Amino acid sequence: MYPTRCVHTISQDDNSVLSLAASNTYLFSGSQSSKIHVWDLQIFSLVTTLVGHRGSVLGLTLSPDQRWLFSCSGDGTIRVWNTETLTCAYLIQSCHDVGDIFSMVYSASANMLIFGSQNTSIQWYDFSDPQTHGSTGGVPVIPINPRKSASQKSKFFTSPAYEDIAEEVDQFPAEHDLVKCVIREKNVRSNAHDGYVYCLLHATDIPNVEGEVILSGSGDGDVKIWSIADSTLKLLNTLRGDTDKGVLCMAISEDGYLFCGVQGGDVQIWDLETNQLIRSMMAHSDDVLAIAIKGPGFVSASADGTIKVWNEEFEFRECMDDHDGIVLSMICSQEYLVTGSSDHSIKFWDMPSPTKTVEQFRRNSIVQDAPSSDTLLYVLDKWIAMRTVSGTPKCMEECRRGARFLKNVLQQLGAVSRMIPGVAGRNPLVYGRFAAKRSSNVGITSDAKVPTVLVYGHYDVIATQNENRQWNTDPFKLTGKNGYLYGRGTSDNKGPVLASIFAVYELLKEGLLDVNVIFLVEGEEENGSVGFQDAVNANKKLFEDVDLILLSNSYWLGEDVPCITYGLRGVIHASITIQNTLSDLHSGVEGGAISEPLIDLIHVTSKLVDNNKRVLVPGFYDDVCQVTDAEQKLYDPIVNWLKTSETALSQSRTQHSAITSPTLSDRSKGSSDSPCSEKRPIIRPTQYVDLDTEKLKQELMARWRFPTLSVHKIDVSISNRTIIPRCAKACVSMRIVPNQSIQDIAGKFEDYVRQVFMDMSSENEISVEIQSSAEYWLGNPESRYFKAVENAIQKEWNMQPLYIREGGSIPAVRFLEKFCNAPAVHLPMGQASDQAHLHNERIRLRNLHAGRRIIKTLLQDLASSSS
């Protein structure tokens, strides 16, 4: 794109340009000298000057039909101008001493003009008032001296004191038809803020609020959201800001971001979905006086004289500094960005159109007459394109867009949906609730309890890491090939989440939804579910009376047999740091004379696990549950399948289910096909390979149900082959199982590591940090919920599913079980070759639709059994 350029400049007498408004024909500019200049937008020439105010014209706005121009002034009045005749039709004054009127907005549907003023009030004039038509009955008294204090000045402009105004309004000869109106006491919201009300914004259907709202920004640093109803304003919410950073200007984007220019040069960005301040940017070196939405990004203008352009990721794009003074005003006309300055000039900027557009889906654009399976793929295509990578600051805004997209999809499919704020600096959760219809099952009595199912999932994904071009397609473009859908998140976890949502939608549409279904989709699962528990705990009322927790966040063991997951290991992430007080040293000078932190760390980590893979921490295995006969039997069909199936083993090392042990992988040697080869992998017949049953069981248990300790990496303070690093840090994880306690294992680990280090008599220092943890989860395969899932799978695939456990961890599962006092069931949809977390992630289209149908069957069965 070419850079933004100034295409025209016009001068406004010898006065600062304080305010701007543009119709299709004219540009209106308010000046410090109380005049309003009218410019022809075609030829950039002055048409006329509107005279009437006796103070600086601080604000201008147009009615939606462009018939009326509203102006507010430092003289404490508002004037309404006919844009066809360019004459003043109404003069509006307050029944109070308001001081400067800084801002105003007009609601066409309510026929109200709302303004914010220096005396901290918000007031409004209702044009249905009889005064509008010339009635003088019961008109409030106007203060004799509304500007008693001439010392109250605006920061960047001054207005004449009231004492200096000798003439009355009706002395203007051209204003003999002027209608004078006075704000009634009932239309005054005194002390609306604890500071001057610098800016107002009118919006419709902002997130979580239907209808019209007014947003007010003040010198107290707060933004307040008001609803317009029954000719009055009602406070809905307050966005608490910094009292040292008054809000001077505001703009709202189509996708629900509120941009606030504040004193000191920052731009604050609020997400109105969650009412969270998601970013405060040091945009300028002085106060931000104007802000405007332009394309997917925004533009800010400041008292430092600069105009800055920001992209949709809120990253700086370019700066214009052509003005020789403070940039006081800015608007977007049909063709140009227009700015006004204290240098008495107005500049017209030609800005390039962005190549990337953001699709909002805030309207009914998702649900169409097409089959829901087609709509599912349409939605998945849009969702995959959103780079919702958690733990990456650059993708934070994209994550929020992905969350907002899902929230809107849920709403359009019939759910009550909202976004739940995460912790500061983290992604929000998406909540959606489909209510049961209770109309399809004749046998269900009216007083029977309606079951409630909570479906858990996540919309965040792992980074693609495509530096070596291992992806065959664009990872953020859904690509269908040979019956598979490729793209980051297709299998983990956007595809299964949408399959679950559309299963519920189909039941709702068919009148067969007889259970309540709650969706809870988080955005930090790939990043340790940071803040998940706090967010859920803060919204307990949304999760009452849950009977079952359902998730689909894992994979089959192979390619041909469906599975049910009934157990996950927990995890403890820890770090061991050994360092000294010296600087990094040269090995040729100091080598052999000091205790080296890296060597000490190697000694310590070498004492964690023995050669037989057994963890050496004392007491590590004390509380591990013994293998029962019932559990042993669950492994028999798995072993039998491993011995007989042609697709039992995946050659990819996925995050979850794939079995890739050296022993087992001997079976597939000789096949060079990649996991994502378009040809079916060639696997040798297994009936000729003698596999020991007990050994297979032990290998599976080692992966799924016994605890482990792993050392993942070692970082040093400096990486150089001749330098002795002063600090070395190892990252360690321990996978825990029933009935191990996180607190107990973490304590034993720390005590043991410190003891091993102490025995070395090193000169260095050691620190052990427990960074995060998640509990194990173990379901009951004999419960009615597992059996219901088993029956639904059998109905779809015509085969008995395998009951499996997994060695990985999903932090939310056990927490949700405790929080809801309800059991969880884990239904894998994808295959072992889905490549989750790896390049060329995919899901088989057949599996996606089968998963949708299985959930439909399950929900119907749950409703029937509850009766």
Image: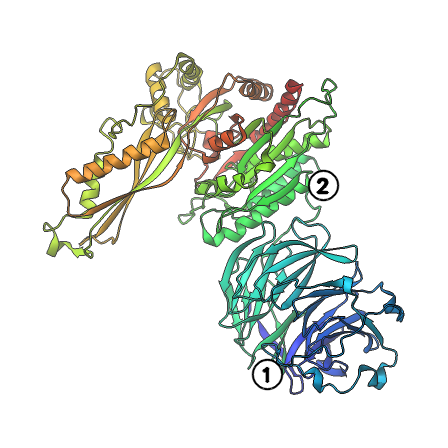
Q: Quadrant of residue 331?
A: bottom right
Q: Mark 1 belongs to which amino acid?
A: Asp
Q: CA distance from mark 1 to mark 2?
A: 54 Å
| Rendered-image quadrant of the N terminus | bottom right
Q: Quadrant of residue 26?
A: bottom right
**Where residue 104 sits: x, y (%)?**
71, 68
Mark 2 residue crowding within 10 angstroms, few (<14) / some (14–19) / many (20+) = few
Q: Which mark is residue 368?
A: 2
* Residue 287 visible at all: yes
Taking 410 as reference, is 643 left or right? left
> Measured along the vertical axis of the image, is residue 76 above or below residue 411?
below
**Where residue 24 sits: x, y (%)?**
75, 70
Q: Quadrant of residue 127?
A: bottom right
Task: Describe the element under mark 2 as helix, strand or loop.
Answer: loop
Instruction: Give the number of marks.
Output: 2
Mark 1 residue crowding within 10 angstroms, few (<14) / some (14–19) / many (20+) = some
Q: Mark 2 belongs to which amino acid?
A: Gln
Task: Describe the element under mark 1 as helix, strand or loop.
Answer: loop
| Rendered-image quadrant of the C terminus | top right
Name the residue located 46 percent from the left edge and 32 percent from the top edge.
Answer: 833
Of badges 1 and 2, the one in the foreground is 1
Mark 1 or mark 2: which comes first in sequence? 1
Nearer to the camera, 89 or 688: 89
**Where residue 15 sits: x, y (%)?**
65, 84
- Say which residue label 1 marks: 343
